Amino acid sequence: MQINILAIESSCDDTSAAVIQDGQVLSNCVANQEAHRLYGGVVPEVASRAHQANIIPVVELALKKAGVHKEELSAIAFTKGPGLIGSLMVGVSFGKAMALSLDIPLIEVHHMKAHVMAHFAETPHPDFPFLCLTVSGGHTQIVKITSHLDMAILGQTIDDAAGEAFDKTGKILGLEYPAGPIIDRLAQEGEAKFSFSEPKIPGLDFSFSGLKTAILYFLKKQIKERPDFLQEEMPHICASVQDRIVSILMNKVKMAVDQTGIKTVAIAGGVSANSGLRKALTQTGEELGWQTFIPKFEYCTDNAAMIGVTAYYKYLAGQFSNQAVAPVARWSM
Ligand code: KG4
Ligand code: ZN
C-alpha cells in the first residue's frame, strides 16, 4: 500500500503544504506573506493571522496538485517547532484536527532537522554519515547526520544567525526585508573590495553580531567623508558583506571536515539559496575532494516538502504523536 503524507509547515512567515508519496514529493505549495515587507521584519501577530487565512487554500492546492484525495492520506505531518509560537499553533491545530477527523496518525517534525532532510526530497542524496551546514533566518549550525532520524549539532551560532546577518545588514543599507536575496543579487554586480574582519570564535561555533556593528561603523565613517557613498558603492558593499559571511561559514565547515574526517558535505536552509555560498561550497569541494550537496532553491527556504520527507522516515519507524501534542517555540535538536 502507498504511504501518502500531507505535511504542513507554518513556523515563520510562509504557509506551506506538501504531499509526499512513499518518500517522493508529489506537490509542494508555499504561500508567501508579503505584509511583513512594510515592517522590515516578520511581525508575529500578522504572521499568525496570515497563516489562518492561507492554510485551507494551501492544503487544498497541495492535495489537488498531487492528485491525492484526503481519504487516501496515511498520516498528517506538521512542524512542532522551533519557530514563532502563534504561527506554529496554526499548523499544529490544523494538523491535529485533520488527523482526528480522518482517523489517521499524526507526525511531529523538528523544523531544523527537516531543513537537513530536504536533501532526501531529491536524488542523488548524500550517504551517511554526512555533514550539513544549516543556515536560516533563525539558526546557523553544523550538523553531523548518521541516519534519517539521527543527527547531532557540532557547532552553532552564539548570537545572530547567518540569515539575520544578511537581513540586519540589509536594514542598515536601507534594503527591504528579507534582505538576503537582495544582497545576493546586488553582490553579483559588485566586487568584494571592502574588508570586514573575521570574528575569532573557538571551535565550530559562529558569531555574526560583530559583523553587523563593523558594517554600521564603516558606513558612518565613509558617508561622513562621501555623502553618496552608499548609492555609489552599493553593489561593492553587498559583495563585501556576502563574501565575509560566506568565508566565516566555509572556514568552520572546513574545520568540521578536518575534525570528523567526513568529506560528504551539504548545505541547507534559506541562506543555502545564496549564490556566493553555493559557489564557495562547490569550489572548495572540488579543491579538497569532498562530495557536495546543494538543494534546489524551492527546498532551501521554508517548505512543507522537507517536513513530509522527514515524516516519511518517522512513519516507517512508527514514531507518531498523539492529540496532546503542542507547539514549542524553542526546541533543541
Ligand atoms: O530557512 P528560511 O526560509 O526560514 C527560517 O527558517 O528562518 O530562511 C530565511 C532566511 C532569511 O534570513 C533570508 O534573508 C535568507 O534566508 N535568504 C538568503 C537568500 N535567500 C534567503 N540569504 C542570502 N542569500 C539568499 N539568496
Ligand atoms: Zn527554516
Image: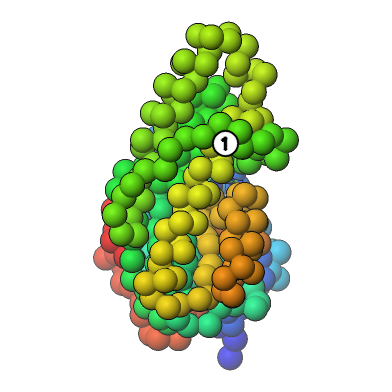
The location of residue 88, given as percent across then percent down, is 39, 51
Left or right: 242 in relation to 107: right
- At 69% from the left edge and 34% from the top edge, which residue is drawn? 190
Q: Nearer the viewer, residue 302 or 4?
A: 302
The total number of labels drawn is 1
**Outermost residue, bottom direction?**
1
Quick check: 157 above or below 35? below
Which quarter of the rendering shows the N terminus?
A: bottom right
Using the rendered view, name the quadrant where residue 129 is placed: bottom left
Q: Nearer the viewer, residue 109 or 277?
A: 277
Would you name the residue on which mark 1 appears?
240
* Mark 1 Cα shell of 10 Å, populated few (<14), some (14-19), many (≥20): many
Residue 204 visible to an observer of this rendering: yes
Q: Nearer the viewer, residue 301 or 277?
A: 277
Q: Nearer the viewer, residue 14 or 211?
A: 211
Left or right: 326 in relation to 102: left
Quick check: 264 above or below 37? below
The location of residue 273, given as percent across then percent down, is 61, 52
- At 45% from the left edge and 62% from the top edge, which residue is drawn? 253
Q: Secondary structure at mark 1?
A: helix
Q: Describe the colour scheme in one phrase.
A: rainbow
Quick check: 50 above or below 202? above
Q: Is mark 1 within 8 Å of ligand 1?
A: no
Left or right: 188 in relation to 257: right
The location of residue 78, given as percent across then percent down, is 44, 63
- At 56% from the left edge and 31% from the top edge, which residue is drawn? 194
**Circle 1: residue type:** Ser
Residue 87 visible to an observer of this rendering: no
Left or right: 179 in relation to 255: right
The location of residue 45, given as percent across then percent down, is 40, 35
- At 60% from the left edge and 56% from the top edge, which residue is drawn? 280
Which quarter of the rendering shows the C terminus?
A: bottom left
